[in-house]
Amino acid sequence: MNQWWRDRVAYQIYPRSFLDSDGNGIGDLRGIIHKLPYLKELGIGILWLSPVYCSPNDDNGYDISDYRDIHPDFGTMAEMDKLLDLAKKLDIRVVMDLVINHTSDEHEWFKKSRDPESPYRDYYIWRPGRNGRKPNNWTSFFAEDCWEYDEHSGEYYLHLFSKKQPDLNFRNPKVLEEIKDIMRFWLHKGVSGFRCEVINVIFKESLEDGRKRMILTGREHYLTREGTHEILRELRRDVLSRFDCFTVGETVMVTPKTAFDLSDPSRKELDMLFSFEHMDTDAVIVKWFRTRFRPKKFCNVLCKWQTALDWNANYFENHDQPRCVSRFGDDRDYRSESAKMLCVLLLSLRGTPFIYQGQEIGMTNFDFTSMEQIRDVESFNVYRLATRLHFPKAFRWHMIQQSGRDNARTPMQWSPGRNAGFSSGTPWIGINRNYTDINVETQEKNPSSVLAFYQKMIRLRNKTKLLKSGGFRCVKIRRKLFVFERFNESGSITVIISFSKKAVRFRASGKPILSTCDRSEYDGILRPYEAILLQGRVGG
Ligand code: ISL
């Protein structure tokens, strides 16, 4: 079968923050429809939409109360159909978020399951306490307990994320049948696949106490268990294989070995997956404790994954991560240079590249100044926990500022006009003050902008077989330099990347195919944060 998902560049939209067409301060489907030509112009071939389903928005749509309907904030099903239709005409494949580890506690299934006699009881994981204590010692992803007590039935339910996100019980075959139906519903509508959210935690092998750990006590009982592999194969067999579609798993805490098993084509589970190790290289144990970014460590991890898997889903940003230019580049003195360098790196690796909205104009972390500007449930929980643990206030704030997910959730900066052209109303979250400089409209007029560079690089990737499907070979990793090669039987391309603010020497011959400094000859010296693609092998 034609694996078109390997040949295309993907773009993630976080709908709340993309474009608001009706002035209620929240991005919507009409806004996305309006900007599809913009994505086409950028060279995008796959569009991943973060959840637009009905949701009470405890976790901005990742708590779904109806999988078959659109949240009124975002629009209507008719608009969704229109979006799918127009995307098809533009040859952009749409991928939806499939959030099945949990639903909202306001989903009909959960409401019914509160009644111990209901056939829906077993859709979720309900357990009695143990002598007045919780059913086990597990801890949650969101810095809170992961068991919530229900007065009415005298039992607890499990939630690995917020308490408004109860975990589904995948030991109940009926649950899986429901999920299959939901998938068919969207595939019949014309979506081309799913980003399968936290898919490697869905199957809880046991509910025993876990080994005490700094994070996620209990995880050995649910991380990538055999039951998950079986479910993935069943979904492929009964649903996905009948459609022209693909899946990308969001797989937390995977190792190269577990990731290999989840995405090995012969096992027929996932087509590719998002791993996290490269995103953890600037953190100590948890993302809330950041250390200095060390390019060497980062590139070593990238190489490891490039070699471990045949195909990666590559990304440097998403709605859960701070902005990459603020993190791996320099958003003060070399914003444009480092944003372009990261663009070359992302789009030259082997695998499907995923660009997150705003990355293509070099959007930076949110310049917020107080907790009042924060909207994310995870940040609230962590801040509360850090207060309980007596972390000094300045440190607590530093944690949120550096690592909070709202960094990437500020509205897309379309123009230097009011509210960055995002909304005519009051935006649901603040807009970064740098929008007068960093915005699409201004960059569209500037041939040396980050946006113009993304267009060029994506175009190059889209037409270059070597970049799309060539093999990967690491050539050199120095403290602030990364050199690798993409090759096939008919040739090769050398990719040279500098993470340095200073000039860096690296001897190589070959004609530049593309450079972030727009040069036609390479003299062996990289300028600050330069990235360059050379025809042929190093020295050859
Ligand atoms: O950002 C994280 C916590 O610090 C990640 O661990 C994140 O929670 C994890 O990657 C799962 O993310 C997905 O599921 C969450 C949702 O909040 C995220 O937005 C989503 O990407 C729960 O549904």
Image: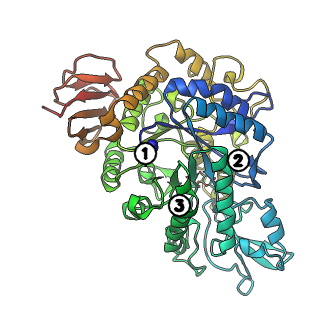
Is 152 on the left-hand or right-hand side of 40? Answer: right
Find the distance from the CA under tag 1 to the CA under tag 2: 35 Å
Q: If you read the primary sequence from the N terminus, does the residue marked by circle 1 or circle 2 appear first?
A: 1
Q: If you read the primary sequence from the N terminus, does the residue marked by circle 3 or circle 1 appear first?
A: 1
Can residue 168 be seen in this snapshot? no
Closer-to-camera residue (355/109): 109
Vertical placement of residue 392 versus 526, above or below: below
Residue 236, numbered label: 3
Is 501 on the left-hand or right-hand side of 474? Answer: right
Q: What's under tag 3, amino acid-wise?
A: Arg
Residue 2, numbered label: 1
Residue 463 position within the rendered picture, expressed as x and y whole percent measured from the top left = 37, 29
Q: Residue at x 30, y 36 (%)?
A: 466
Vertical placement of residue 36 versus 111, above or below: above
Q: What's under tag 1, amino acid-wise?
A: Asn
Residue 127 position within the rendered picture, expressed as x and y whole percent measured from the top left = 72, 80
Can residue 421 be seen in this snapshot? yes
Q: What's under tag 2, amino acid-wise?
A: Asn
Q: Is mark 2 within 8 Å of ligand 1?
A: yes
Circle 2 residue = 60
Vertical placement of residue 371 versus 420, above or below: below
- 3 vs 1, front mark: 1
- 1 vs 2, front mark: 1
Residue 436, located in which quarter of the rendered image? Answer: top right
